[in-house]
Amino acid sequence: MDTGNILLLIGLIASIASLSVYKLNRRYFLYALILAFLFISSAVLLLVYYFISNDLSINYVYIYSGDLPVVYRIAAMWAGKQGMQLLLVWATMLFILLFYMKNQENNGFARKISYIALGIVILFLSITLLDSPFRPAPGSSEAGILSGHGLSPKMISFWFLIHPPLVVMAYAAIIILFASAITYLFSGEKEWVVTARSWGRASWLLLSLAMATGGAWAYETVGWDGFWKWDPAQSGALIIWLVLTAVLHAIIRHQRNFREYDTTAPLLSACVFILSLYVMFFSRKGVQGSEHNFLGSDIWAILFAAMLFTTIITLYLIMRRKSEESGWKMTLNSMNSLRTSFHTAILLLCMLAFVPFWGITHSIIPEKIFGDQILIPKEVYNFWSFPIILLLITLTGYSLLQGVVKQKVLKLITLLAIFTGAVTAFFPGPTLLDPASEFYQQSTFLGQSIGSVSVISYIPISLFGVGGIFFRFIHGKHRFSCSNTGIGLIHAGFIFIVAGAISSTSLSTEGTVGYTALELNIPKGIDAVWRVSVTDISTTVKADNGSEQVLNLNFYKNGNPHGSGVVSLSKSDRIGNFHKLLVHRTLFTDIMVHYDGDALNPSSIRLRTEMMPLVNVLWGGTLLMIGGIIFLMKPNLSSKTG
C-alpha cells in the first residue's frame, strides 16, 4: 500500500474515532478532528510532491503529469476525479475544523453539525480510498517510463489554476449548510439560521466565482462554445446556485420571524446538498454532450445511494417535525406585501432551477435505462428560461420599490414596464429562437409564437429592475449600509449578466477571412469597421509527430492600427488538434479569431472570426454581483456572529 493510502486510512480512522469521542470530551473531539485533518493534509501534500517530482510510478501522476511548468504540475492534482475527490475531502475537513473551533462556546450545537459533516467526510474519504489517486501505474516496476501523458493544452490556462478549487470549496461549504439544516430539523435548535446564512453566503460566493471563472475559461477556449453552452455540469452548477439563492431569500425571512419558512428554509438547504450529490453522480456516470464527465469507475453507484439515503432522511425529518410555519392566505392586501414578493421570488428561482434539472435528467434516464442518446438543444433551455427571467427581474424592480414609493404609483410603473415589454416583444430584431433551428421547426404554433418574441423585450423590463434598485438606493432607509449596497449590487449584477448574455449571443456575427503567402500585411475586412492582417507565419516541428503553425495578426479599426495578437494550430499524436484562440478585447466588442479547420498550409490560410458585441456588460455584471456578495459577507463564519 502506498504511503498516500496509508495517510488517508489513518485520516479515516481518526475521523471515525472523533465520532466515538463525540460525547466524552470537548478537547478529545477537537484533537481527533485536528489529527484527521493533518493526515488528510499530508496525503494532499504527498500527491503534490509526486506531481512536482514527476513520480510516474503513480498512475494518476502518469496520466496527468508531463513536461510542464511547476505551477501546472501542482494544478494537475485536480485534473481528474481522484484528485478532485481528495481535494473535496480536505476542504470539507478544513471547514469542519474552522467551524468547530469558532463555535466551541456553543459546544452542543457545534458538535451536532460537525458530527453530521464528519459522516459525509467519512463517505467521501471512503470513496477516495476506493478510487485512490495513489494507485501504482501498470508496469511501473519496469524501467522505461520517461514521461507521463500530460495535461490537455486546454488545461494550460490561468483559469484552470483557480476554477476547480473554487468548485470544490463551494461544495465543501454547502456541506456545513446541509449539516446545520439537518440539525435544526432533528433538534429544533434555532441557532442554525445564523450558521446557515453565513455558510450559505460563503458557498454562494465561492460558487459564483467558480461559475464566473469557468465561463471565462470556456470563453477563451475553441470548441467549448463560449462562456455558456448549457453543458450538463454548467447547468448542474446553475441549479445549485439558483436553489442556494432561494435558500438565502428564505433564510432572510426565517431569521426575522421563525414561523416563516420554518420547514421550507431547511428543506431547501438540504436540497442544495442533495443536488450537489446529483451533479457528482451524473458527472461520473456520464451525460451525453458534457465536457465534464469523469468516467472509469463505479463510484457513481455509491453517490446515487448516498443521494437517495440523504433524500429519504430529509423527507423523514420534515414529516416528523411539527411545523410552526405561519399560514398564508392569498388576499388583495397580501398580494402587495413584501412577504408575497419573497414567496414569489423563491418559487420563480425554483422554477428556473427546474429547467436545467429537467434537461439533465431527461438526458440521463433514456440513455442509461433504454440506451437512447438524447441531447437537449440549448434552444430548449433558452425557451423555458427566458419568460421566468423576465418575471424575476420584474419582481426585482417591484419588490425593491415596495415601501419606497406609494402603492398606486408602484402598480402604475410596474404595469407600464410590463406593457412596454409586451409591445417591444413584437419589434423586429433578434428573436428568442432561431427560426431555422430544429427545435423551432418542430414546435407547435404556440411554441413558435413564443419563440418569435423579440429579445428586445428584455430592455424595458431590465430598465425597470435597474431603476428600482437605483431609486431604492437613493431614497430608501439605511441606503449606505453594507447590506443595502450588497443587495443592490447583486440584483443589478444579475440583470446585467442576463443583458450581456442576450446581447452578445443574439447580435454576434461570424465570418471567415482567407490569406495566401503573398498577402502578408494586407488588411482584410471582418466587418465594415474592423480589418485584420497576417504579418508573419511560422511553422515548427515538434515531438510525437507534431507540428505547430503560428500566425501574428494586426487589427485595424476604421483603417487605424488597433492592437495585435497571435493564433496558432498545433497537431500531434498525443493531443490531436489544438486551436489557440485570440480574443481582441475592446470596450464594446470582442473580436475572436482562430483557424477555420485543421489544415496546416502556409500557402493558404483561412481564419474564422466572431464579433461579440456588449459581452463586457456580462463581465461587468459578474463583478457587480460578486462585489455585492462580498458586501453582504461578514468577517467570520461562526454560528454566533454569522
Image (spheres, rainbow, N blue to C red):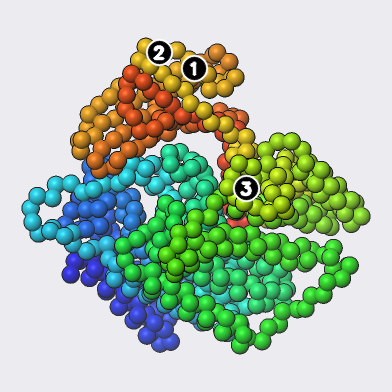
Amino acid under disc 1: Lys
Q: Which residue does the image show at 35% across and 80% down from the upper left? A: 16
Give yes or no for contact between labels 3 and 2 (Cβ–Cβ under 8 Å): no
| 599 vs 430: above or below | above
Q: Nearer the viewer, mark 3 or mark 1?
A: 3
Spot occupied by residue 257 in the image (x, y as percentages of width and height): 73, 73
Horizontal placement of 114 versus 49: left or right? right
N-terminal of the pair, mark 3 or mark 1, is 3
Q: Which secondary structure lies at badge 1? A: strand
Q: Which residue does the image show at 57% across and 75% down from the upper left? A: 181
Give yes or no for contact between labels 1 and 2 (Cβ–Cβ under 8 Å): yes
* Quarter placement of the C terminus: bottom right
Task: Mark yes or no: residue 414 visible.
Answer: yes
Q: Which of marks 3 and 2 is in front?
A: 3
Amino acid under disc 3: Gln
N-terminal of the pair, mark 1 or mark 2, is 2
| Residue where numbered disc 1 is placed | 524
N-terminal of the pair, mark 3 or mark 2, is 3
Spot occupied by residue 419 in the image (x, y as percentages of width and height): 84, 47
Spot occupied by residue 516 in the image (x, y as percentages of width and height): 38, 16
User: How many labels sit on residues?
Assistant: 3
Q: Which secondary structure lies at badge 2? A: helix
Horizontal placement of 415 versus 188: left or right? right
| Residue where numbered disc 3 is placed | 441
Q: Which residue does the image show at 50% across and 46% down from the upper left? A: 215
| Residue where numbered disc 2 is placed | 519
Task: Mark yes or no: residue 42 visible.
Answer: no
Q: Which secondary structure lies at badge 3? A: helix
Quadrant in the rendering for residue 130: bottom left
* Quarter placement of the N terminus: bottom left
